[in-house]
Image: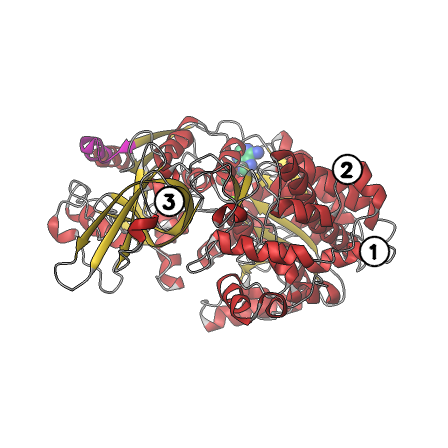
Amino acid sequence: MIGWDSELDRVLGAKTAKALDGAFGISTVGDLLRHYPRRYAERGELTPIGGLEIGEHATVLARVERVDKRRMRSRRGTILQARITDGTRSLSCTFFNQAWRERELSPGRRGMFAGKVTAYRGELQLAHPEYQLFSEDEDSDEQGAARDFAGALIPVYPAAQGIPSWSVGRCVAQVLDGWEGVRDPLPESLRQRVGLVSLEEALRLVHRPDNLTQVNQARRRLKWDEAFGVQLALAQSRQRQGTRPAPSCPRRGGGVAEAFEAELPFTLTEGQREVGERIAEDLSGERPMNRLVQGEVGSGKTVVALRAMLQVVDAGRQAVMLAPTEVLAAQHARSLRELLGRFGRAGELGAAEQATRVRLLTGSLPAARRKQALLDAASGAAGIVVGTHALLQDGVSFAELGLVVVDEQHRFGVEQRDALRERAGERSCPHLLVMTATPIPRTVAMTVFGDLRTSALRELPRGRAPISTTVVPSAEKPAWLERAWQRVREEVAEGHQVYVVCSRVGDESGETSSTETGELQAAPERGESGQRTPVSVLDLAEWLRRGPLEGLRLGVLHGRLPSEDKDAVMRRFADGETDVLVATTVVEVGVDVPNATMMVIMDADRFGMSQLHQLRGRVGRGDSPGLCLLVSAAMPQSPARNRLDAVASTTDGFELARLDLQQRREGDVLGAAQSGRRSTLRMLSLVHDEELIATARAEAEEFVEPDPELRDHPGLAAMVTELVDEDRADFLEKA
Ligand code: ADP
Ligand code: MG
């Protein structure tokens, strides 16, 4: 009998097993059965050729249109070219020295063709195609391909060179025929409640369905298992957080928090007040806070975090604030000091009596300052320490750490958060506050951030000037771009500052500079791929300096600069000593220069919608209205252009996040969110399966609450282990 863990070389033979392993990393029966069809083709249908993407390995159902054979001029031999069609568009398949295929590939015959999609002289091609023809008489013929494609639905598998979809299908069929089945990990009662078929049935149906109803039944069950496994793991993680106590930091009257608030130059928004209350409550408890605050760019998250940090300081503990880059850390330290005023200058002249001390602690600090900061952290003299994540990795010691604030780090996965905590506190577990300006759709919040409680700041402080956004189509309307540079000059003439953002730094080795041509915008370079090389920071800055922005004070900022330089450039811009900052997305998060009123984003189509939204949030932070220009060569109605139009048409970040999610592939969402970890969700969709995820979350809570280790449900415990890969399981063990 063939079991779940049977090795494929035993079942399918060494050669086939090796090929599957090489192509997909599949080595057991279980692996193969989890290699689900990507889609199903109906017997009579043809695959729309227009929908193919260049570079993908595609499986196409098509009809042979015509076949041409010719002699190669340079060498001896023949080229056979078959054009296949979906009825509208066609695609060519080229075979070298296989003239005999002419007999098989007669016009009118249908089949599946597989290969990598390439483009040659504007024509789509399948490179090194493999094919399997259907029998000529679809209804009666019993042999050959017809047997493999007997069902009405043909599963189309993720395939690879040398292993076309139909070979995968044949292996699966062989395995299923001798498979002993598998025990269902889900309790019967749960299956009934949610309406799910058994695991064995789901696996059989997903590979060999007779109709779409069966496909849907199978998919629902398999998706459920993914959603449920993740939710069980998260529920366990939430439970575990309660086991190591956090330092309780109740509010204290007469401390720095109260004094600071009394002198705040503005009134808190409703949202800031509300979220503040939640956090204050969390902090006063012994259960470690684990909270995510989402708030639009400019919604005032910093002051929310600061109030939390001060409450912790009043309780005699310390807070650290972590930023993703040194630039941001430096800026946070500055703006915290500024906000705090005399309350942040303990030990200095003119400090308030309750004052605490803010210390920046980064790798690039001069040795003496770094030493002082380390001392202040260790002695407790610094109530607030600001740095990057390296700060905790480097094992900096604190006298009494009570709170970790992580800013703009939505790409941080569950494990990183747990690890962070682990390192942060030896005796106790500090409270954790994560802040993000990227609004997170509910499904993502439930899955990727399922271990966090979330709250949102939905309103912007009053008096904030609106940002208007316009797309500048540089290909169709080059004059608009010229006008844009003029507009930059006008803005600067009025005493304001401007960001110009590029997707690339430039000056990579082997790259030719386009500054020489002096026609950077008008005649964009085209690379070999036919795609325009995106404008780079270095090239553009040089070109602007000599051309349209001559005489203005330009700064250049990008990730390759040494940290000290970055900091200096940023500081000059913040102090108004630079008019225009040409930069990469280093300016994306958290940068706050209220006098900056305009942003020009070059090759805007290279950025995601949420990212553009974040970027433009850098302007219009003062009282003057903000202007954002999205420069792009994307054609009207192209998907890229539609995305830009969407960004221009709304300033609702939550709406854009939803659209962004729909546009991306699932793997990207989870991949990015879990920082590169292989996604364990093969079938579950964060876009479409909201209801299923919500149900799974509620059910998981029910199981884990009374039985955190799932001792009464070994099947469920095994599901969790199957989902989380080894080192993560390892990690959960330790925590
Ligand atoms: P973000 O949420 O993007 O991090 P910040 O915390 O940097 O936003 O706040 C943006 C600006 O708004 C800062 O200059 C801050 O001082 C100011 N601000 C914050 N809260 C208020 C408020 N309630 N009223 C007026 N201005 C505020
Ligand atoms: Mg911020």
Kindly indicate the quadrant of the structure image that contains residue 136: top left
**Could you tell me the amino acid type at mark 3?**
Glu
Q: Quadrant of the N terminus?
A: bottom right
Identify the residue shown where x is 47% and y is 73%.
367
Helix, strand or loop at mark 1? loop
Q: Considering the numbered disc 3 on the image, is that residue within a helix, a strand or a loop?
A: loop
Q: CA distance from mark 3 to mark 1?
A: 45 Å
Which image quarter holds the C terminus?
A: bottom right
For label 3, the crowd category at 10 Å Cα-Cα, with few meaning under 14, some 14 to 19 and many 20 or more, is some
Q: Is residue 65 above or below residue 320?
A: above
Return the x and y of residue 18 as percentages of the image width and height. 52, 69
Q: Nearer the viewer, residue 561 or 198?
A: 198
- Residue 377's x, y, as percent? 62, 66
Query: What number is the disc on residue 194?
Result: 2
The amino acid beneath tag 1 is Leu
Give the CA distance from mark 3 to mark 2: 37 Å
Task: Please report whichever mark, 3 or 1, sits nearer to the chain's N-terminal start.
Answer: 3
Query: Mark 3 CB in 8 Å range of ligand 1?
Result: no
Query: Do callouts 3 and 1 mark residues in contact (Cβ within 8 Å)?
Result: no
**Which mark, residue 710?**
1
Between disc 2 and disc 1, whose residue precedes? 2
**300 above or below 533?**
above
Which label number is shown at residue 53? 3
Q: Say whether residue 298 is magenta.
A: no
Crowd band around label 2 with a 10 angstrom C-alpha radius: few (<14), some (14–19), many (20+)? some
x and y percentages locating residue 655 in the rendered image: 52, 31
Specify whether residue 351 is in view: no
The reply, left or right, for residue 276 in relation to residue 73 is right
The magenta stretch is: 472-484
